Amino acid sequence: MARSRSKGWPDAPEPLPLPVVDNHTHLESVLAWRADGWEASSSLDAQLERAAAVGVTRMVQVGCDLAAVDWTSTMVGAHEQLLGAVAIHPNEAVRHAGIQEVAADGLDPEDPYETSLDEAFAHVAEVARDNDRIRAVGETGLDHFRAGPAGRAVQREAFRAHIALAKELGLALQIHDRDAHDEVVGVLLADGAPDRTVFHCFSGDAALARLAVSHGWFLSFAGPVSFGPNDALRSALREVPPSQLLLETDAPYLTVHPFRGRPNAPYLLPGTVRTVAEVTGRSVDEVCTSVVATSEAVYGRW
Ligand SMILES: [Zn+2]
């Protein structure tokens, strides 16, 4: 017997009136997700078709562990809908550095990797340099929820190396900032942020949004902007001009209301588009148009 439908893939939303871009998605993890309700969900072509059918015609595929970096590099070459971002995720950096400590989340640390952080980062740099469909370095940054003191120190140096790489190659930067707002801003200002710096899944308040906007950084909002308790995030959203606003699923996580807890994929971005239109008092058409223009300003045309 099938498991409860409440855990399965949500139905496709009503199509958007205009195309839009998903600024940050992990399709390799979407395809690995096992859920009921949609048999073709483990095919990349089916995912891309289902997204396009509701207006999500293009996306930035983010590969931020070694296997996903290679998968991303291959897939962005084979599918014109996709651009890529590559990095060693801050929590992966800790594993490559061989650090095992319990952090704020209280979970047991994950096993360390054999491959050193230097080797892993060198591979990211090579892929980013050689593949012109890789247009961003990310996600990189700081995760104070998942990392303890030794891990945070490693994350900070890895973040700095990724910033330097983005600047060297003239690529955008996608930032992961979990419970580390002040420190992320501190590193960006000390080292100098790349010209196109994006806070992926922005999670700060209105004050941080104003600060980021004032520095010319881009803010990308995901499903949590639709969650009931997140008034501070909606206040932050109202501070962001359309020319610095991006939207994303961060699939397979953070599924937009009312599907929280169910698997996420790019075809569910319309719920976030509609939430953003409502919160900002703009039309859905305006949001789609500006997100496409801003995405192309950040990543170039594709
Ligand atoms: Zn992500």
Image: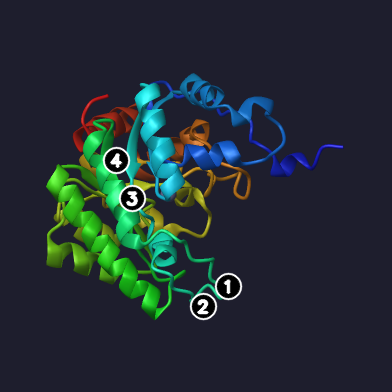
Whether residue 282 can be seen here: no
SS state under label 2: loop
Residue at the far right in the pictured view: 1
Q: CA distance from mark 3 to mark 1?
A: 24 Å
Residue at mark 3? 87
Going by the numbered disc 3, the residue's amino acid type is Ala
Is residue 96 positioned above or below 108 on the image? Answer: above
**Which dot marks residue 102?**
2
Q: Position of residue 121 (x, y in %)?
A: 30, 54
Figure coloring: rainbow
Q: Is mark 4 within 8 Å of ligand 1?
A: no
The structure residue drawn at horizontal position 42% and vertical position 49%, both measured from the top left corner, is: 66
Residue at mark 4? 127
Front disc: 1 or 4:
4
Q: Position of residue 237 (x, y in %)?
A: 33, 50
Pointer 1 and pointer 2: residues touching (CB < 8 Å)? yes
